[in-house]
């Protein structure tokens, strides 16, 4: 096939204007699942679909080092984190994160979150209106800190949540949003670097089973402790994504409102846990979260008659793959029951990236996301009542990351008994 190539010197501005639809728009116009464009002054190949994801997560063909733009490292990821490692270095660091995802550890973070939900509901009962999105980010932030072992004072909770939120919100942004994210990352790295140093000097004593302890004392392949900055980046690689689950839960709340029949399915029948999991998975598929992910070609190869040259930047279209009509029947219809037939393929459902967990680049925290989203549904459907007043509930696919315009206001919150 002839690789469709978008004309023009650079299309970075179009990416900011079109957001999640940037890659799908071009693929729709070319009637293909692979196209070439130019972003930030360089050639970029964009791919979509199950076969594309299988290709993208082949570590012999792709590498992550040098894939993330400097502006993303300065705001979202930080330098030296697991996302930018390859081969043995990546496998060794990834094993650290996988070791944190035990059944006991997942049970612990779920218990922490449930306690924070109870505290939050009590507080919301006394508030006339609740801006749910920011409240959920705060709830997830304190959950993340308690689970990881990171000490946090109540007086600092707002600042820490705002910084983590700003880092997330800087993705796909230019101007003030981007610079807020960069400033927030500097402040957050300084905070966690200080904590790592204090733990190493025994000025802060923490449980040896906590993620903070394990990252603080983690040794690289050469047997050396991570430098304090890299350790701080990896701790933030737990705090930031867990805080971001607040965005998913906000969309869960929106889905409960927009699709009441799906809410009824959760609350009825004998398979409530299965119904909750299907609902959560459909929220993760249907609503916009990560738009795409990138890697660089490790060596020249040909795929579908297209030559991929070494060091070329390749973007896997996450949003487009999760809405690909060749993979999903009526992809723009919200239908949790579609997951009754899903077989767990790691390449056709990729809301937080694809591939295998142990050896690949799939997000190790995906299990945490699913468990905390399921737990949140219990509170949103059974442990509290609330109303959603008239407001602008639309979200723009041009904004990355997306969120309802009014951040989803709820009122008349009341606790429900079992």
Image (tube, grey):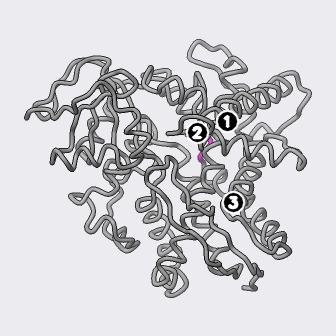
Q: Is residue 405 left or right of residue 151?
A: left
| Residue 213 coordinates in the image, percent (x, y) | 75, 33
Please, what secondary structure does the residue beneath circle 2 have? Answer: loop
Question: Whole-Å distance between the Cαs marked 3 and 2?
Answer: 18 Å
The answer to which of marks 3 and 1 sits earlier in the sequence is: 3
Residue 60 seen in the figure: no
Residue ID at (32%, 30%):
314
Mark sitting earlier along the chain (3/2): 3
Quadrant of the snapshot with the N terminus: top left
Could you tell me which residue is drawn at 34 percent across and 35 percent down?
Answer: 315
The part of the image, by quadrant, that contains residue 248 is: bottom right
Q: Quadrant of residue 174?
A: top right
Which of the pair 157/231 is nearer the observer? Answer: 157
> Mark 2 near mark 1, Cβ–Cβ under 8 Å?
yes
Residue 309 vs residue 399, the one in the foreground: 399
Using the image, tell me which numbered label, if any, was put on residue 180. 1
Q: Is residue 295 at all visible to an observer of this figure? A: yes
Q: CA distance from mark 3 to mark 1?
A: 20 Å
Q: Quadrant of the C terminus?
A: bottom right
Q: Disc 2 or 1, which lies upstream in sequence?
A: 2
Residue 354 point in image, percent of width and height: 39, 44
Residue depicted at x 69% and y 59%: 136
- Locate residue 384 relative to residue 169 in the image: left or right: right
Disc 3 to disc 1: CB gap under 8 Å: no
Residue segment shown in magenta: 97-101
Q: Hey, which residue is sitting farthest left in the picture? A: 1
């Amino acid at each position: 096939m002839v690789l469709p190539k978008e004309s023009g010197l650079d299309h970075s501005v179009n990416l900011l204007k079109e957001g999640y639809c940037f890659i799908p728009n071009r693929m729709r116009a070319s009637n293909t699942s692979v196209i070439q464009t130019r972003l930030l002054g360089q050639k970029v190949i964009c791919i979509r679909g199950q076969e594309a994801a299988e290709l993208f997560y082949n570590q012999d063909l792709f590498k992550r080092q040098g894939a993330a733009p400097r502006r993303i490292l300065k705001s979202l990821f930080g330098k030296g984190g697991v996302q930018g490692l390859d081969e043995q270095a990546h496998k060794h660091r990834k094993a650290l994160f996988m070791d944190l995802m035990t059944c006991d550890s997942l049970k612990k973070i779920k218990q922490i979150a449930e306690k924070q939900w109870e505290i939050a509901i009590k507080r919301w009962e006394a508030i006339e209106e609740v801006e749910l999105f920011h409240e959920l980010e705060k709830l997830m932030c304190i959950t993340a800190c308690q689970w990881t072992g990171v000490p946090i004072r109540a007086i600092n909770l707002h600042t820490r949540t705002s910084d983590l939120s700003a880092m997330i919100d800087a993705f796909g942004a230019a101007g003030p949003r981007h610079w807020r994210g960069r400033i927030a990352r500097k402040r957050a790295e300084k905070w966690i670097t200080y904590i790592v140093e204090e733990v190493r000097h025994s000025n802060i004593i923490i449980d040896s089973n906590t993620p903070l302890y394990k990252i603080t004392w983690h040794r690289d392949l050469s047997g050396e402790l991570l430098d304090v900055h890299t350790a701080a980046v990896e701790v933030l690689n737990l705090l930031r994504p867990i805080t971001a689950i607040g965005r998913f839960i906000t969309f869960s709340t929106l889905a409960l409102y927009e699709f009441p029949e799906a809410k009824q399915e959760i609350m009825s029948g004998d398979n409530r846990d299965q119904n909750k999991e299907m609902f959560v998975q459909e929220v993760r598929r249907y609503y916009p979260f990560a738009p795409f992910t990138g890697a660089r070609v490790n060596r020249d190869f040909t795929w579908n008659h297209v030559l991929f040259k070494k060091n070329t930047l390749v973007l896997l279209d996450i949003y487009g793959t999760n809405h690909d009509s060749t993979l999903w029947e009526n992809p723009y219809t919200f239908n949790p029951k579609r997951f009754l037939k899903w077989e767990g393929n790691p390449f056709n459902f990729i809301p937080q990236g694809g591939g295998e967990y142990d050896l690949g680049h799939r997000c190790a925290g995906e299990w945490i996301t699913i468990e905390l989203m399921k737990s949140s549904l219990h509170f949103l459907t059974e442990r509290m009542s609330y109303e959603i007043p008239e407001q602008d509930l639309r979200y723009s696919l041009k904004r990355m990351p997306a969120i309802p315009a009014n951040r989803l206001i709820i009122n008349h919150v009341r606790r429900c008994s079992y």
